[in-house]
Each structure stands twice: as C-alpha cells, then as structure tokens.
Amino acid sequence: MATEKMTGAQALWAALVREGVTDVFGYPGGAILPAYDAMLGYPIHHVLVRHEQGATHMADGYARASGRVGVAIATSGPGATNMVTGIATAMLDSVPIVCITGQVGSKLIGSDAFQETDITGITLPITKHNYLVTRAEDVAPAVREAFAIAKSGRPGPVLVDITKDAQTSMCEVDWDKTEPQLHETMDDELPGDGTAEQAVALINGAERPLILAGHGVMLSGAEREIVQLAEKAHVPIAMTLLGLGGVPAHHPLNLGMMGMHGEAWVNTAIQEADLLIALGMRFDDRVTGNLRTYALNAKKIHVDIDRAELNKNVRVDVAIAKDLRGAVAEWLPKLVANPRQAWLSRINELKGDSAVRDIQNLPDSGHLYAAHVINDLWRITEGNAIVVTDVGQHQMWEAQYYKHDSPRSLVTSGGLGTMGFALPAAIGAKMACPDKEVWVVVGDGGFQMTMCELATAMQEGLDIIICIINNGYLGMVRQWQEFFYEKRYAATPITGPDFVKLADAFGAQGKAVDQRKDVESAVASARRHHGVSLIDFRVEQEDSVYPMVPAGADLHKMIRRPSPHPIVETAAD
Amino acid sequence: MTHTFAVYVDNQPGVLNRVASLFRRRAFNIESLTVGHTHEPGMSRMTIVVDTDDYGARRLEANLYKLVPVRRVENLSSRAQISRDLALIKVVAGGDTRAQVMQLVDVYRARVVDVSPDSLVIEATGTEDKIDSLLEVLRPYGVVEMVRTGLVAMARGAGAAEKTAPRASRVAADAQDNLGNYSV
C-alpha cells in the first residue's frame, strides 16, 4: 500500500478510525488544538465533557459496557493531570482505555513552559504503558500500539502524549508498517506453574468446593465455561463485586457476592470450603478480610491471565497464568460429575435464616430505605438496565439488591473506589449502548463531585436516569464512624442543592421521593421521559450496609443488622 | 535472601525509570542496580539485586515482564553464576605506608591506577565480599573516596540462561508475611 502524506494530527485521527473508534470524550486546549482542528475531517463523534476526569470515566464506562476500547482526549498540563483519577480507576479495574494528551512543543519540554507537565512521568505507575511522541511519524505507530496494549492480556489504560510540533509536522504514513509489533514477553509456562491435571484432580477430589468468580470471567469471555464448570461438577459460585453479571444472578448455583458487604452465607461458605477455585479475581483485601484466617481449610486453585497476581495475597496450591476461558475449557471434559449433596444442603442451611426474610414482604414503615428503592428499581426494570454506580453505601446496596443476570450490566469503580465515577461513566455506557436503559445510582456526595457532567449528557441528548440515594451524609464513611469511631461524625454530614431545581436548571426532569409508595410512579415517569431524568430519593439518614466484615477482620466475623429492624441483610429472590 | 536478576530491556528513554518505579511501587528494595549495553544493538542489560523471598522473586519477575520495554528476565540466583563488582578506592598512602598499601593491593589482586605524592587510586574487581574485605583493610590508612559499580552477573556455562523460577512451597502459613494488606 502506498504511503499517505499527512500531519501528525491527521495521523492521530486516521489511526483512531482504523482502530474502529467512533466516539471520543474530550476537552480541547492549546497544546491539543492542532489535533482538534484536524478532527473535523474524520468520522468520529466528539463528546465535549465538562472536566477531563469526566472524559476518562466516560471512556471507562464506554469500555466496560461494550468491551470496546474507550478513548479520552485532553490538552497538556491541567487537562492531562485532571485525567489522573480516571486513569487510575481504569488501571485498578483492568479497563481498556486510551488517553491522548497534547504536550508543549518538543523544544520546550523541560523548560516549565505554559501548561507543561510531565504526564508520562505522572501516569507511569497507573498505566499499562505510556508514550511521549515528539515526531509526527511516530504518532500512528504509537496510537496503534496503545490500542494493542490496552486490549491485550489483562486490559488497562494506555496514555499517548503528543507534542504540539508532532501534531503539526508532516509525515508519511505506511499503514502496513504501523502494525503493532508487540513481542511476547512471557513464556506460556514456567517451572512451578500449575497444570490442568492438577486443577482437575483437586476439583474431582473436593467435597466442599467453591468457585470465586471475578471480573476476569467477563474480560475473558468465559461466562459460558464457568457455568458449565459449575453445573458439571456441581460447584456453587461466589461473585466479586466486579464479577457480578458474569454468572446470572438467578442461576441456582450462584450464591451471590462475597467480601466485606457480601452475603453472610457466602463468606461462611468460603471459610468452610475445602477447595477454592479462584477465576479471574485477585484476592483483594475487600474480599478476603484477615488473610491469617482466610479459608484455612481450603486448597486453592487460582487462574489469572496476569501472572503477577498469582501467589500475591493468598498462597495457592495450583497457580495457572492463562486466559481463563481456555484454561477452564481444558478442564471441562475431565471433570467427574458429583452431586455434592451434603455441601449444597449445608449452603442452603447457611442461607436459611436470611432467605426466609423477604425484603418485599416488609411492612412499609413510612421511612424510605435505600434497599427498598434499589429493589424496586430492579423489579420495575426487570433487571434489564445497565446500572452505573458510584462508590459508597448505595454501591453496596445496589450490588446486594439489584440482581444482575447479564454481563456488563453493572458498571462500578471497584478497585480504586472512585467517588464521582457514576454520572460520567454512565454517559460513556449510554454512548456505547444507546439501545440499553442506563441508570445512574449515586449518593448525594459522589453526585456533587461530577454533577457538571449533567450538561454533557444534556448536550448529547442522552436518555439517562439518575437515582440519587440522598441521605445527607457521606454514608459509608458515616457508617465507619458509627461502628469504629464512636459515632463522631467528623466531616460526614453534607448538604446539597435542591436536586430537583438543579435538574431543572440543566433542562433535565427532576423529582423528589421520600415515601416508598411514590417510588414506582417516579421510576415510571422517569422511564417515560425522553432525556435526562433525575430522582432525588430522600432516604433514611443513618441506615447502614449489612452484613459488614470490618477491614482486616476475619471473613466469617460479620457485623449483622441489629434485630429487630425494618429491613434485612439481603433480598431473597 | 537476595535474588539477582538479569533484565534485558529495549534501549530507549525512560526504561530505567520504569524499572525503578516498579520496584518502588511494589515495595521491593533494590540492593544494587547496574545497566549497560549488550552485544545486541538496541538492547541493554540490567543486573538487579533484590532482597526478597522466592515468592517475591516470582512476582517481581512477572511484574517486570508486564513492562513493555522488558524483553527477557533471568533469575540468576537459582543457578551457577559469576558476579563481579568493580571499585575505585582512593586511599592515603604517602611515605611509610605506601609500601604496605601496595602489598595489600597485590594480595587482593587489585591494581594501582593512579599515583600522587600522598595517595593511590586502587582498582579492584571481584565479588562484593572481596571488595568489602579490601575496603576494610584499607580503611585504617585513610580512605578518601570510593566508588563502586554495583554487581554485574552472568550465568556460567555455554548457553544463555534459561528461564528459571523457584518452585513454590505450598504452605498456608507462608501467607503470614503478606499480612496487613488491607487499607481504608
């Protein structure tokens, strides 16, 4: 193929188009201006954000909802540094995004020029890789390699910093030569790696096995294989927060979420298991509790595509560094069917007392509880919405009471726990999946961090429904203060604007709800509305999320909801 | 225990920063790090000495491989290897003591590379222990300054080192050294 002559800025867009990019999220500025000027000549839709953090979260939400690489773009200096939180969020949750930043002219680098910042230095530990591009001819290869790196192996963010002169200079691009040349850097197997035979032998020999399914199930596309594994060998499944949706919540072997705010029976089952099969999860401290007492009776199999995760927090008996889907598929033919009656009935027994108390049968006490709101939301949307949550109590209630049956239907910041994530991530999710119903579930604190992006959603004319769980506190921190700091509520009471008027000011529809009986009609009206809709749910102020494993405590020693109390730990469904 | 890694990296700007940043971020302590060209153009080789257990070494190797410019990592500790350190030591040696210092230089098979009326500069190559020992015997004469390259290492034998990784001992109690990993 003949070479094409173009500017570095044109090479950027041409490379993005070649990667299949149709939407980017960005904010222009001096050092990225040549790129923006060239943008108009390419079939890419640009979403103007209101803050660059929003751009990265939108790219992130776009990627999580669709599996495609999200793209964010910003100028040098403050534009680039504003992206840092979003990049770290994507890094911790293995989300493929590519961030493009402008940089001052290459001759000015190191001179503290206006809006100069060392963004490749700053983002070095929070990207899979990053590039400082100073020549036009390097733009296309860097961008294409960035996509390859973002998508490959364990996905993650990649940043490409392009100097202004690299954008304006001419270059010749030979697309065949820009093909990414990523060398294989890790052998398939190392001495000490576990084998499929070892894993199968442990599974077939186990009496009380349990699958721990994480985000990797979806990233690897192993949803079907996990269910086959569970069904064939009769192994129940516990989910991590980011794993939710990877296995249908209604699958009879799916026990629900594990960890700090997981189901009590799941955490107890982990402690009683004789084999943990950890698939695409990383034994985060939020799911293990005290490592010294974690699953002491269990042998452990760990499969992760990232070898550095193996034997990191928990020592395992069989460590397999492979793509999950292929690894599990290898086991399937060798599994021996085993009904494991005793183990499954033991789990039902553990579930027992919680399962009979159904949240839907509770009397309406006149107070509005977040758990009710979320549960109603799940019922009314029939579990079919993409729910994008922020971070805190509402996030945990959502995970407990909204039952996700399909992959990528929950978008949430797990590893970094980034408040302010929900609204911009939902904008990205809606852009990626315009035919899906997208709900934002957010606290009154987190919403106020990035509510400027309401304007972005309005400008794009998106149908998004925002459900604010408004308790007038930074609720999760308040809960910690209640449990561990003798109720000294330092800096957790928070006021907010009149969210209904705020919605109105942005041109969105707003409603406030403080009675359970009004939930259904408010949700219905929001779903009918074309455009952005906001519901301010004014919920019980000092409600807490139960059960709770205090940070660093033994996994089976959960704080349970004091009884009697108007609502219970979890929804039976 | 200490582990010595040979790390082959693309010779491009910022690689040292990426490697050093990884060690810092993952809370590994670098005891020594040297870097220089290899016989292959465009490829540099680092020799990195780290104090960690076998699990740590495995994880470190895996993390190094996640850096895009890292081409190959060899853990030399589990194999027969040659390691060398080079030191330049400036020591006070005028008049009576000069002959004594020269004698020590001979004993250690070191060389005198600079002579001035009151001092000598000694070049010594060898294992870290040998250099440490030479330094100790020279100290009484008055060491003015010293510089060391840090360790460089290579596997013995004809071939390039194969991939090696310590086989992990699978004991639950080993998890203790990883306690306290929770954060707020």
Image (cartoon, rainbow, N blue to C red):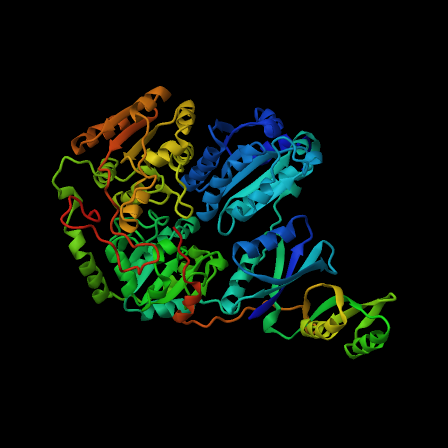
How many labels were placed on the picture? 0
Please provide percent x and percent y for residue A310. 46, 61
Does residue A91 appear left or right of residue B98 in this picture?
left
Please provide percent x and percent y for residue A568. 18, 47
Q: Give the quadrant of residue A113.
A: top right
Please provide percent x and percent y for residue A534. 30, 28
- Viewer-side residue, A340 vs B102: B102
- Viewer-side residue, A127 vs A429: A127
Say which quadrant the N terminus of chain B sits in.
Answer: bottom right
User: Residue at position x 36%, y 42% from top?
Assistant: A391
User: Residue at position x 52%, y 69% from top?
Assistant: A191
Please provide percent x and percent y for residue A459. 42, 23
- Viewer-side residue, A253 vs A57: A57
Q: Using the image, determine if residue A285 lies above or below residue A414.
A: below
Residue furthest left as drawn: A363
Residue furthest front as drawn: B96
Residue B66 visible at all: no
- Viewer-side residue, A494 vs A340: A494
Residue A239 visible at all: yes
